Image: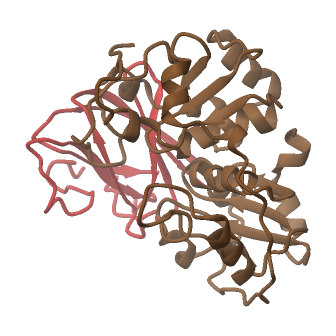
Chain colours: A brown, B red
Amino acid sequence: MSRETSLVSADWVAQNLNNPAVVLIEVDEDTSLYEQGHIEGAITFHWRDDLQDGLIRDLISKEKFEALLSKNGIANDTTVVLYGGNNNWFATYAFWYFKIYGHGDVRLLDGGRKRWELDARPFVTAIPARTATRYVAKERDNSIRAYRDEVIAAIGKSNIVDVRSPAEFSGELAAPAHLPQESGQIKGHIPTAKNIPWSKAANEDGTFKSDAELKELYVGAGVDLAKDTIAYCRIGERSAFSWFVLHELLNVSNVKNYDGSWTEYGSLVGVPVALGA
Amino acid sequence: MRTCGATPGGPDLSGIDLTTQTVIQGVILRDGESDGVPNGTPVGNAYVRLLDFTGEFTAEVPTNADGQFRFFAAPGTWTLVVLASGAREERKVIATQGTPVDLVLQI
């Protein structure tokens, strides 16, 4: 993994719009964005309807993932390029998802929709017709996914990185500030977690900072990259962004995304919680 | 100059419980006529970033088709940064629970 294999620029996408080996997939939190306009040739995955089980809280099954990709004309050797709004939060979540199911060549558009829009590059509304394939996924790779028990076991031992905003980390806010504040979970953070907001890894235009800046961001905040690392946020999307930075851009192999995140941890009975900065 | 309080610019607040939510919202307009009144075109593809009192990023939203945005923050001092193609504006705001901050921002 490296910047060269996991990330593409807007120029690269513009040059590969008609490349049949490349499929662009937009994944947004605001799922109406795709209909309003998207990069030419892009399809869209709905973060909830397509990527959540719907009955239990979990990823969709291997069989459903295979059906989703087959229906959308994605083959095992397709170069999948993901992008989206919100600085690629949901696109990096989808990237992590493709890695969970072992897709070979998946990349992220640096800066996502925002960089594309700020560059005043064109969007279209035409929805491409794609020929179905027969996609075969691998068994889930749980080496990049953390579950609650290993998060609790990691307290005080491994790196735990809370990538939410400082206001959520300290317990002032319960959700990101573009969403209504919830009352279901208690507020706070996992004890011994370092608060390294996802946003510190990105430039204002949504592109990633340089590898040297990114490494300094985590090491400077006290993350020992030789140890195992678990990243979490509220529901696992922003931490997928930080997982992408560590695992893909900085090539740190022992990093997991805890997609249960604060909505799970903050609802558990009896687990330790810390407040304040 | 039209004041922000007299002409709220953000989305409709019905359905929002203002007794529990601290709302910062508004509308982004392109420069209007030369009288200084922000009556230009709504900017529907802008990004609004919310920074806390230390300048740390807290949240970001794209504007809707009417150029509007909304944050659910906490009481205190915040900074809004508006990004659009070819434009960048900052505005400091003080948010309180109960009374929404409603802005008209011109770029």
Residue A145 drawn above or below residue A122:
above
Residue A92 drawn above or below residue A54:
above
Q: Position of residue B51 (x, y in %)?
A: 43, 31
Instruction: Determine the image quadrant of residue A85.
Output: bottom right
The residue that appears at 68% across and 49% down in the rendered structure is A96
The residue that appears at 68% across and 59% down in the rendered structure is A83
Q: Is residue A115 visible?
A: no
* Camera-nearest residue between A144 and A127: A144
Q: Position of residue A263 (x, y in %)?
A: 37, 41
Q: Position of residue A212 (x, y in %)?
A: 81, 21
* Camera-nearest residue between A178 and A242: A242
Q: Position of residue A177 (x, y in %)?
A: 35, 41
Residue B27 drawn above or below residue A145:
below
The residue that appears at 21% across and 40% down in the rendered structure is A183
Is A220 left, or right, of A273 in this rendering? right
Residue A246 drawn above or below residue B59:
above
Q: Is residue A120 visible?
A: yes
* Camera-nearest residue between B54 and B84: B54
The residue that appears at 39% across and 13% down in the rendered structure is A277
Instruction: Determine the image quadrant of residue B38.
Output: bottom left
